[in-house]
Image: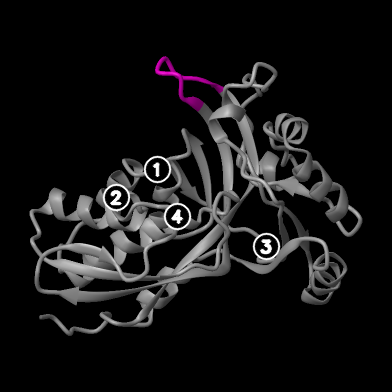
Amino acid sequence: MDFMAGWGERWPAPAKLNLMLRITGRRPDGYHLLQTVFQMLDLCDWLTFHPVDDGRVTLRNPISGVPEQDDLTVRAANLLKSHTGCVRGVCIDIEKNLPMGGGLGGGSSDAATTLVVLNRLWGLGLSKRELMDLGLRLGADVPVFVFGCSAWGEGVGEDLQAITLPEQWFVIIKPDCHVNTGEIFSAENLTRNSAVITMSDFLAGDNRNDCSEVVCKLYRPVKDAIDALSFYAEARLTGTGACVFAQFCNKEDAESALEGLKDRWLVFLAKGSNQSALYKKLEQG
């Protein structure tokens, strides 16, 4: 059994926000072509990896209602094993802090942390690019968490370029609903022909989300959350939702907004970070 550094430690799986989402076309296979901006946050799930001798991949505390083999972390570990021929096992302990189905990337980030950390603990030596390609097989948002920093995304969201963003404070509301992404992308009135913009256009303030109108029409709790948060600052939808967010220049204003909202809503306070908390920990040793 292997007790090298890293086993038994808590590894962060950070949240993200989509600060902008434009749909610029469609591929022949039906996937939508996007432009988006991913902002990393200091809000995290935490994963701990324990070595086991029997070669199996298991969860210490399976999520209620999710079959263990369908969990993204288990799938990520098994994909890593099958891709490399690794025969080692692991028991994964997940501390869930990020809401499921909110658009903050919790499951995708958990999968990315599993790929990155087990690649190191198992001594597999895969490059970041190889891990990103594996991650894309698990979900469209997994590569950005393997990439590990705030990013400009194109294609179906997997063509990534690092972007430096103001590390501001965010107040995030999770409405009491789960937005069906497939339903949004198949909606007849969804804008699918937005003009392509540049990174400079976004940084100058072009930050619209082409999914917002459709999501607010189909999911009243999302519209209500945007209306409530708009009292404090400009409120926007992340990705296809359900979470909505607003940016604040200082912590005090963000905390004031949170205080005014927390009695009615599930609210999170987070700080933007250009580098993923996962890679900050990796750099520390």
Res. 107 mark: 4
In the rendered view, would you say 230 is above or below 188? below
Q: Circle 2: is it few (<14), some (14-19), or many (20+) Cα within 10 Å?
A: few
Q: Nearer the viewer, residue 270 or 265?
A: 265
Task: Report the magenta residues as a range.
Answer: 25-32
Amino acid carrying label 2: it is Arg
In the image, what residue type sits under mark 1?
Gly
Q: CA distance from mark 1 to mark 3?
A: 27 Å
In this rendering, the label closer to the viewer, 2 or 1: 1
Q: Quadrant of residue 80?
A: bottom left
Where, by quadrant of the figure, is residue 92 drawn?
A: bottom left
Disc 2 to disc 3, C-alpha distance: 26 Å
The answer to the question of whether label 1 and label 3 lie on touching residues, with beta carbons closer than 8 A, is no
Would residue 273 be seen by someone viewing this image from the given angle?
yes
Q: Earlier in the sequence, mark 1 or mark 4?
A: 4
Q: In this view of the protein, which residue sits in the foreground, 20 or 204?
A: 20
Image location of residue 181, percent across then percent down: 56, 35
| Crowd class of label 4 (few under 14; some 14 to 19; many from 20; radius 10 Å) | many
Residue where numbered disc 3 is placed: 166
Binning the other alpha carbons within 10 Å of mark 1 as few (below 14), some (14 to 19) or many (20 upward) gives some
Mark-to-mark CA distance, 4 and 2: 20 Å
The residue identified by callout 1 is 139
Crowding at dot 3, Cα within 10 Å, few <14 / some 14-19 / many 20+, comes out as few
Q: Which mark is residue 121?
A: none
Say if mark 2 contacts mark 1, CB within 8 Å. Answer: no
Distance CA(mark 4)–CA(mark 3): 25 Å
Could you tell me what secondary structure mostly forms the magenta stretch? loop
Q: Which residue, given by chain and number where applicable, does mark 2 sit on? A: 129
